[in-house]
């Protein structure tokens, strides 16, 4: 369920971190993290906003272009992958740490 996914995310991303993701999908975690909406981000803005982590969920994957894929491959480390949960449409979720 969604609460289990939240707990897994919290294991890998420290409270207070700046995270790129979809705030509507992660609204219950807004007290833990500062979120930037994935629709407003590009590789340059990620650096300018000091984003440290990326929650790369199934929705983002399906809507992304090669720019974000290249950024992930060249500038990030995959630190966790939360497997597919049939009742959670945004899973599987990959958690990336940006290497600045």
Image (cartoon, rainbow, N blue to C red):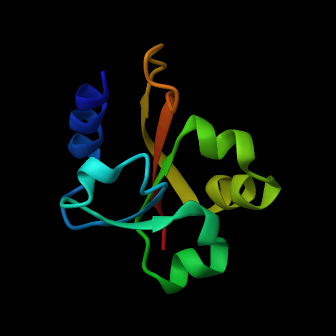
Is 73 on the left-hand or right-hand side of 34? right
Where residue 83 sits, quadrant-wise, is top left
Outermost residue toward the right in this view: 66
Outermost residue toward the bottom in this view: 48
**Relative to residue 96, is residue 62 depicted above or below?**
above
Name the residue: 73% across, 47% down: 63
Q: Nearer the viewer, residue 88 or 41?
A: 88
Is 3 on the left-hand or right-hand side of 36? left
Q: Quadrant of the N terminus?
A: top left
Q: How many marks?
A: 0
Residue 26, image x, y percentages: 36, 48
Residue 53, image x, y percentages: 42, 59
**Relative to residue 37, is residue 47 depicted above or below?**
below
Is 15 on the left-hand or right-hand side of 42? left
Name the residue: 23% across, 30% down: 3
Residue 45, image x, y percentages: 59, 80
Name the residue: 61% across, 40% down: 59
**Relative to residue 47, is residue 19 depicted above or below?**
above
Q: Nearer the viewer, residue 13 or 79?
A: 13
Outermost residue toward the top in this view: 86
Q: Nearer the viewer, residue 76 or 40?
A: 40
Name the residue: 50% across, 51% down: 77
Residue 91, image x, y percentages: 49, 28
Where residue 66 sits, quadrant-wise, is bottom right
């Amino acid at each position: 369920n969604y609460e289990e996914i939240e707990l897994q995310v919290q294991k890998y991303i420290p409270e207070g971190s700046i995270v790129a993701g979809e705030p509507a999908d992660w609204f219950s975690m807004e007290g833990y993290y500062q979120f930037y909406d994935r629709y407003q981000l590009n590789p340059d803005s990620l650096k300018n906003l000091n984003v440290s982590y990326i929650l790369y969920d199934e929705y983002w994957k399906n809507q992304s272009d090669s720019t974000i894929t290249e950024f992930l491959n060249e500038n990030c480390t995959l630190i966790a992958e939360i497997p597919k949960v049939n009742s959670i449409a945004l899973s599987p979720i990959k958690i990336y740490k940006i290497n600045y």
